[in-house]
Amino acid sequence: MKFASFYRGGALNVGIVDAATGRVRPVSGVADMIDLVTRHAQSKISSSAPELALSEIKLTAPIPVPRRNIFCVGKNYGEHAREFSNSGFEAGAKKDQAIDEYPAIFSKGPNTVIGPDDDVGLDPHISAKWDYEAELALVIGRRCRSVSKAEALDCVFGYFLANDVSQRDLQRRHGGQWLKGKSIDRTMPIGPWIVTPDELDLPEIQLELTLNGKVMQSALIKQMAFPVAELIAELSFGMTLEPGDVLITGTPAGVGNAREPQVFLKPGDEMVVSATGLGALRNRVVAANLHGTTDIPSMGAGT
């Protein structure tokens, strides 16, 4: 099944999507997607409400406001790990450095989330180096802690897409940890809907990002260094995961920061993230004032 969050008449709804016909059937009796995910662990979800055309509604992020920070994985594709080390981004990294022994896990703020067709604001005061990152994302479906790799996939409610738009100069600025350079408000599109695992051949999903029509990233999910089951096992090791928790699983090679010459986002760009069976995110980059009245100096000025 495919589950979407959408606005109709100013109200937030959750529905079951039929992508083939372009229609959605609202689900009654649930407050939001996290409520639906929690209830799904107890019973099947169905709906007898009249269908709506997708053209009649406004899709939003499947989980518009995650209740906790979003869990993230870095350097989870071999070619991306190599381009990352060769770019000089990480101090002390050796040329052609291979995947680490364990996954690099960090988090980003929940207010980063926007919908699958929303504009991504770009503010040069905050960063001069805005970059794209296509990622497979998932939502946890039941409370779990210290699960084995054999049990881990049973904890997944479903999968969707994410574009982990990052500010590379800001990412390097704070002691080598990545939270700040990944947490600018309203800069991460997710969606367009959540697809349950039974509809997907996970290893064979082809993940792709185009920038202004040009393919910049393309990889199969089976090329991950740490598969989804291993990521969940590592993340839940001694730490409780809750229904509705979001995990983004890493980006393939081809990011703008590692290219020669480098390619950073600019107003007017269009990013499209797509993957087999998961739909697409289509997001324009627009100029925006995201820094407000801060007295922090501009990153765009090189300070």
Image (cartoon, rainbow, N blue to C red):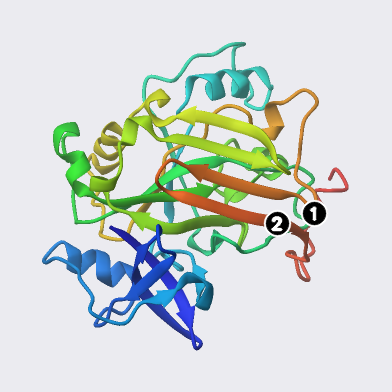
Q: Disc 1 designates what residue?
A: 268
Q: Given the current orientation, which residue lies at the most extreme bottom position?
A: 9
Query: Is residue 189 toward the left or the right of residue 12 in the image?
Result: right
Q: Quadrant of the N terminus?
A: bottom left
Query: Is residue 85 toward the left or the right of residue 237 in the image?
Result: right
Circle on res. 284: 2
The residue that appears at 80% across and 49% down in the rendered structure is 266
Q: CA distance from mark 2 to mark 1?
A: 6 Å
Give residue 237's quadrant in the image.
top left
The residue that appears at 30% across and 42% down in the rendered structure is 200
Q: How far across and how far down the image is residue 207, in percent?
A: 49, 36
Q: How far across and how far down the image is residue 243, in percent?
A: 26, 60
- What type is the residue that disc 2 sits on? Arg
Vertical position of residue 227 compared to residue 290: above or below? above
Q: Is residue 165 visible?
A: no
Vertical position of residue 101 compared to residue 182: above or below? above
Sequence-wise first label, 2 or 1 = 1
Circle on res. 108: none
In the structure shown, which secondary structural element does the residue marked by tag 2 occupy?
Answer: strand
**In front of the other: 148 or 200:** 200
Q: Quadrant of the C terminus?
A: top right
**In front of the other: 12 or 250:** 12
Q: How far across and how far down the image is residue 268, in percent?
A: 80, 54
Does the residue at mark 2 contact the one at mark 1 (Cβ under 8 Å)? yes
In the structure shown, which secondary structural element does the residue marked by tag 1 occupy?
Answer: loop
